[in-house]
Amino acid sequence: MSIEIKMPALSPTMEKGTLSKWLVKEGDTIASGDVIAEIETDKATMEVETADEGTIGKLIVAAGTEDVPVGEVIAIVLEEGESEVAAPKKADKKAEPSKTVTEEKAPDKKTAEKSAPEKITSAKASTDTDDRVLISPLARRLAKQTGLDVSTIQGSGPGGRIVKRDLDGAKPASKTDSQKTASSPVSQAALQAAPITSDIPFEEVKLSAMRKVIAARLSESKQTIPHFYLTVDVRMDKLLAMRKEINDGEGVKLSVNDFIIKALAVALRQTPDANVQFAGDKLLKFKRVDISVAVAIDGGLVTPVIRDAGARGLGSISDDMKQLAEKAKAGKLAPEEYKGGSISLSNLGMYGIKQFDAVINPPQAAILAVGGAEQRPVVTNGEIGIATVMEATLSCDHRAIDGAVGA
């Protein structure tokens, strides 16, 4: 029996991906563990290994195809003795990665009457409005993403349930309704185009999957997370002297950022009430400090994670950071290398930036933004002198971290 290879979910937020390149062709023999394709996700370009053995019978999705839904068949593998490729079953392109959603068909009258009580009962558990609108999970998700007012839609499903086909032509939700959908995984408002009112020449650049996720997640962050900001001046002279001594004496290459990662981890171990995450009716207090470090790449940024930074030495942090940064810039980060993190760090000092306020990376509760170190006149014990100073600004989620704790 032929084997279907489907578009995998390569990151927690991935719903669609771009099949960048096939590394096999029809007729090739493959074994478990072989790399068969490169797929661009919302985080990086990743190699896909197969767990199957056989012969590539047909490549269903062509290289370069964008927005291939997770779960859609992309290739057929023939097992030993097979010579023909069976037509693959079509996946629901709107299905979520974690479940399969099928479109309901309008039943006949008798079937509707028999099934209505059961449908109504299950729908009540998943309603979205105060009016207890009966709506399928798929239709509910699509209505949220497109900002539709479901209270004005007449359902054609069992018991008057709203299904996907009923959304065609529905009117957008009012401002109040739109506010309810602001925290959806990909906020439609974040991706709406602004009207073109200028005659300045321009070039249209299609958003990548990564840029779409950045737009949606950071719009969600500013709309739903109450940010407040705390800034301090940091004297860097002793740190820079220590760095020079270590680098000269031990033949290593520690960066200033390595020290900042370590210092942030130590600060969070000393202040565990800040190493938290808001989770609705509770707080998650982390017992380990995992720091997500922002790395700029072509077309966006990614945040590889330095695990348990508080318990590690500077050399270990430095080695890990170098490897993760190289993999990030090459688009080769694995999901376990960027998932999680209890706080983020963004350093723009190398660009000459003195100070900035960073946007919190949800679901985290804080991000530290650091600028470049510069020599300034400072007053010490009533006398003016010169010192090397860096500004650091902590952005905090006030639902999880109070002012004194952040300070």
Image (cartoon, helix red, strand yellow):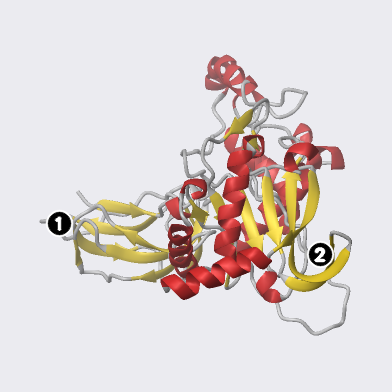
> Percent x, y for residue 150?
74, 35
| Residue 56 in the image: above or below residue 168 | below
Q: How many marks?
A: 2
> Percent x, y for residue 177?
80, 38
Locate the C terminus and report the quarter of the image it occupies.
Answer: top right
Res 170 seen here: no
Most foreground residue, 46 or 176? 46
Mark 2 to mark 1: distance in Å?
53 Å
> Percent x, y for residue 249?
45, 72
Secondary structure at badge 1 equals loop
Secondary structure at badge 2 equals loop
- Which of the 4 image quadrants contains residue 118? top right
Q: Looking at the rendered structure, which numbered label has been put on residue 194?
A: 2
Q: Looking at the rendered structure, which numbered label has been put on residue 395?
A: none
Residue farthest to the bottom, as pictured: 201
Q: Looking at the rendered structure, which numbered label has been put on residue 82?
A: 1
Q: Is residue 307 left or right of residue 262?
A: left
Q: Earlier in the sequence, mark 2 or mark 1?
A: 1
| Residue 88 in the image: above or below residue 140 | below
> Percent x, y for residue 319?
43, 64
| Residue 282 in the image: above or below residue 153 | above
* Residue type beneath disc 2: Ala
Of labels 2 and 1, the one closer to you: 2
Res 247 seen here: yes
Q: Are the residues at dot 2 and dot 1 in contact (C-beta closer than 8 Å)?
A: no
- Which of the 4 image quadrants contains residue 175? top right
Most foreground residue, 397 or 122? 397
The residue at 48%/63% (across/down) is 318
* Residue type beneath disc 1: Glu
Residue count near mark 2 (Cα–Cα under 10 Å), binned few <14, some 14–19, many ≥20: few
Residue count near mark 1 (Cα–Cα under 10 Å), binned few <14, some 14–19, many ≥20: few
Q: Is residue 114 left or right of residue 217?
A: left
